[in-house]
Image (spheres, rainbow, N blue to C red):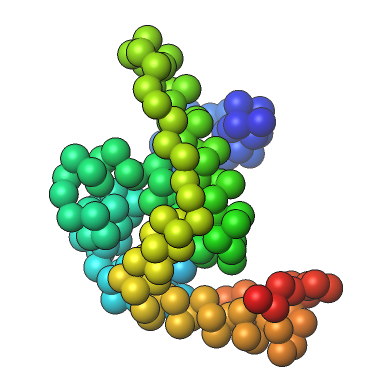
Amino acid sequence: HPVKSGKVMRAAAWDGEPTVLIEADFAQIELRWAAFLSRDPAFLEIFFGGRDFHHEVALQMLGDEQTARTMRPYIKTLVFSNMYGAKVGQLISLLNRTSRDAEIRARLETGVATPQKRWEKAEVQDFQDAFWARFPVFADWIDGQRRFALEHGYIETFFGRRRRWQVIDRD
């Protein structure tokens, strides 16, 4: 629960004496690690440019500002799904859930019901293929991590910690 964990974090950093408060924003930290580890120049360029990652990817993939703004939540779902190895069927489910959530949010904000986008397999495959084509270095790094895990039964973190998997999807 964010409120409880926030209180715990503040309590851990507070000694009771007036002092300087330091705020740390870990926004998109997983993507920053992925950019660092994969050394994908396109990923790194976005972060070094200080731009919103998901909006920038949407803009690069889709071409215009309005479409990028509308599609940002779907790009976010696509990026994290690809990073964590989702297949097209899983991605369809996640994108449709994102669509439902966006429709509910829009209805709450505007009071107007908007049609919910339904994602189909061919469209999702094209969407995923376009992402991998835009970030080939990242795609190769993810594929290398997957091959390593298949061969060795574990993956190793940047700091050398091993995470074992009993089942790794071979598709």
Quadrant including the C terminus: bottom right
Determine whether, in the image, residue 56 is placed left or right of residue 135: left
Q: Residue at x 61, y 79 (%)?
A: 146
Q: Position of residue 27 (x, y in %)?
A: 42, 48
* Quarter location, residue 127: bottom left
Q: How many marks?
A: 0
| Residue furthest to the right | 166
Q: Position of residue 5 (x, y in %)?
A: 64, 34
Q: Residue at x 60, y 37 (%)?
A: 9
Residue 155 in view (yes/no): no
* Location of residue 71 with respect to 105 vertically, above or below: below
* Quarter location, residue 147: bottom right
* Quarter location, residue 109: top left
Q: Residue at x 28, y 49 (%)?
A: 55
| Residue furthest to the top | 111
Q: Please state which of residues 159 and 131 is positioned toward the viewer in this rendering.
A: 131
Residue 166 in view (yes/no): yes
| Residue furthest to the bottom | 151
Q: Residue at x 52, y 64 (%)?
A: 83
Q: Position of residue 99 (x, y in %)?
A: 46, 36
* Location of residue 46 with respect to 157 vertically, above or below: above
* Location of residue 105 with respect to 144 vertically, above or below: above
Determine whether, in the image, residue 164 is placed left or right of residue 38: right
Quadrant including the N terminus: top right
Q: Please state which of residues 144 and 120 is positioned toward the viewer in this rendering.
A: 120
* Location of residue 118 with respect to 17 vertically, above or below: below
